[in-house]
Image (cartoon, rainbow, N blue to C red):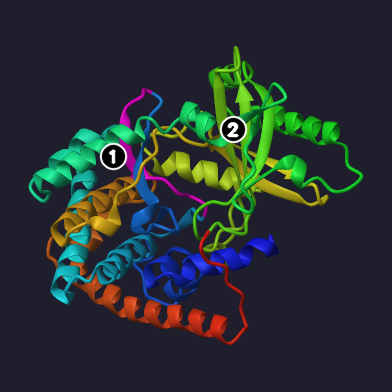
C-alpha cells in the first residue's frame, strides 16, 4: 500500500537497529553471497532477536519461541544464525555496550546454539519434536544474570502478557455504535473497513465477502478447531498497521462474537507475499504464500495458535492476495531489549540460540549440522567476526536511507 511506505521508512530511520528490523530483504541478498555448509532446514528467514517472544500454547501454558514466519522457507540454516547473531551485535551498539561486551553476547548465543544442536543430535526423534522452552525455564536461565528488580519486572511483564488476549483487545480496540460493537478508527494505524470501501460498493456486499472468506479459511483448520470457529459470528473488520518490516503490506483485524456480546474472538489476517529468500534459495513449493507461512510455522514452532490457517482473498481493488490468519493476541509478549544490561542480554541470547537450534533440528539433518559445528568455539568466533562486520554494513545502509530521505528521494513519516 503506497500510502503506508513512508511510515515504514520513518520507523526504519529511528536507529540502525530499527533499520535492521525492516531490512530482511537486504540481508537475504547479502547472505546469498556468503559461503554455507550446504545443509538446509526450514528457516525463519527473519530471525532477529525481536522476532522471539512468549505466547500461549493450546494447553494454556506460556511458552517461548520464534513468533514471526513471514519469510520462512527451506534454506541454509546459517542464514538464520547470522541474522540472529548480527541483531545482538547491532542491539548492543544501540545500548552503548563495549565491543568486548557485544562480542561476549554474540558468542554466548552462538555457543548455546552449537551445544543445543549437539544435544539434539544425540536425542531421539520424538524427544526433539516434543522439546520446548517454557517460561519457568527462562526465569531459571535469567536468574544469575538479572537483579532482583529486573526479575520482578520480568514477572510483571509475564503477568501482563497473560492479560493480552481477545478480551483485552475487545476493551481497547472497540466501542459501541448504535448498539453494535465496532472497531475504533485511528488512522492511519487502524482504519475500519467502511472507511476503505470504494464509492459505489455496498457495505452489505463487503460484509458478505468477509463472511465467505472466513468460511473458506475454516477449511484449513483441524476439524475440532473448525467446529470452535463456527460458533463465532463475524461482526466487524479494520486494516491495522503492524511491525516495521510489515508496514505497507495488508493486515486486517477481524472481530467475531460467540454466545453473546462479551464473548469476543479477534483474528488477524496478515498478507503473505513472496518470501525475501525465494529469489536466492528457490521458490516455495506451496501455491499459496499463506500456506507457506503456516506450514513453516507449524514445522518450526513447538506449538502453534489453534486458529492458524490461510486463505486467498480478492480485495476491494479486485486483486487476489494470499493471507494467513491467527489470533490477534493470545498471551503474547516480548523482551524489553531497550532496558537490558549486557549480562542480561547475553542470557537472552542463549535462550534465543537454544530456541533456534530446536527449531532447525525439527526439519534439518541435526546430526550433520552438529558434526559441522564441532565442539570447539571456532564457529562461535567466526560468527562473532561476521556480526561485527555486518553491523558496520548495516550502519552504512541506515545512513544511506537517511541520506535518501534528506535529499528528497524518499519520503518518510515519523511519530506514528
Q: Separation of disc 2 and disc 1 at Cα?
A: 24 Å
N-terminal of the pair, mark 2 or mark 1, is 1
Circle on res. 174: 2
Please, is residue 389 above or below residue 8 in the view?
Answer: below
Vertical position of residue 252 compared to residue 172: above or below:
below
Residue 270 location (% of width, % of height): 59, 46
Depth check: 88 or 174 in front? Answer: 174
Which contiguous range is marked in magenta? 59-70
404 sits to left or right of 128: right
Residue hosting label 1 = 157
Viewer-closest of 229 and 98: 98
In the displayed structure, would residue 3 be above or below residue 406?
Answer: above
Rendering coords of residue 96 (x, y %): 22, 71
Q: Give the image location of residue 15, x and y in percent.
A: 39, 71
Q: In which quarter of the image is residue 138?
A: top left
Q: Quadrant of the N terminus?
A: bottom right
- Judge left or right: residue 19 versus residue 199: left
Amino acid at each position: 500500500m503506497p500510502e503506508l511506505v513512508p511510515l515504514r521508512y520513518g520507523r526504519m530511520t529511528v536507529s540502525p537497529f530499527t533499520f535492521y528490523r525492516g531490512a530482511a530483504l537486504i540481508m537475504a541478498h547479502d547472505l546469498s553471497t556468503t559461503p554455507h555448509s550446504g545443509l538446509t532446514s526450514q528457516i525463519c528467514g527473519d530471525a532477529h532477536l525481536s522476532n522471539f517472544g512468549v505466547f500461549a500454547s493450546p494447553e494454556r501454558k506460556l511458552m517461548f519461541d520464534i513468533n514471526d514466519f513471514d519469510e520462512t522457507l527451506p534454506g541454509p540454516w546459517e542464514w538464520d544464525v547470522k541474522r540472529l547473531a548480527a541483531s545482538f551485535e547491532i542491539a548492543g551498539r544501540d545500548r552503548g555496550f563495549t565491543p568486548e561486551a557485544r562480542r561476549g553476547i554474540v558468542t554466548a548465543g552462538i555457543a548455546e546454539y552449537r551445544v543445543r544442536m549437539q544435544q539434539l543430535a544425540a536425542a531421539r526423534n520424538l524427544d526433539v519434536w516434543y522439546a520446548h522452552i517454557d517460561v519457568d525455564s527462562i526465569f531459571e536461565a535469567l536468574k544469575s544474570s538479572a537483579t532482583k528488580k529486573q526479575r520482578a519486572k520480568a514477572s510483571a511483564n509475564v503477568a501482563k502478557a497473560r492479560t493480552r488476549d481477545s478480551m483485552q483487545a475487545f476493551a481497547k480496540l472497540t466501542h459501541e455504535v448504535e448498539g453494535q460493537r465496532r472497531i475504533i478508527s485511528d488512522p492511519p494505524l487502524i482504519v475500519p473497513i467502511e472507511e476503505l470501501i470504494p464509492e459505489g460498493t455496498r457495505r452489505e456486499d463487503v460484509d458478505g465477502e468477509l463472511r465467505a472468506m472466513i468460511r473458506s479459511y475454516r477449511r484449513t483448520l483441524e476439524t475440532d478447531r473448525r467446529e470452535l470457529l463456527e460458533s463465532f459470528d463475524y461482526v466487524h473488520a479494520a486494516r491495522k498497521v503492524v511491525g516495521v518490516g510489515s508496514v505497507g503490506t495488508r493486515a486486517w483485524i477481524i472481530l467475531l462474537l460467540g454466545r453473546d456480546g462479551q464473548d469476543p474472538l479477534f483474528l488477524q489476517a496478515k498478507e503473505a507475499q513472496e518470501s525475501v529468500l525465494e529469489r536466492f534459495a528457490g521458490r516455495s513449493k506451496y501455491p499459496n504464500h499463506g500456506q507457506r507461512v503456516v506450514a513453516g510455522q507449524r514445522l518450526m514452532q513447538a506449538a502453534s495458535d489453534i486458529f492458524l490457517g490461510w486463505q486467498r482473498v480478492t480485495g476491494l481493488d479486485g486483486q487476489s492476495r494470499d493471507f494467513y490468519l491467527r489470533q490477534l493476541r493470545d498471551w503474547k509478549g516480548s523482551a524489553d531489549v531497550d532496558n537490558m544490561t549486557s549480562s542480561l542480554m547475553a542470557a537472552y541470547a542463549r535462550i534465543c540460540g537454544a530456541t533456534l537450534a530446536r527449531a532447525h533440528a525439527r526439519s534439518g539433518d541435526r546430526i550433520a549440522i552438529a558434526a559441522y559445528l564441532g565442539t570447539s568455539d571456532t564457529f562461535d568466533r567466526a560468527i562473532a567476526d561476521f556480526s561485527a562486520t555486518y553491523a558496520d554494513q548495516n550502519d552504512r545502509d541506515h545512513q544511506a536511507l537517511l541520506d535518501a530521505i534528506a535529499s528528497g528521494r524518499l519520503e518518510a513519516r515519523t511519530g506514528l
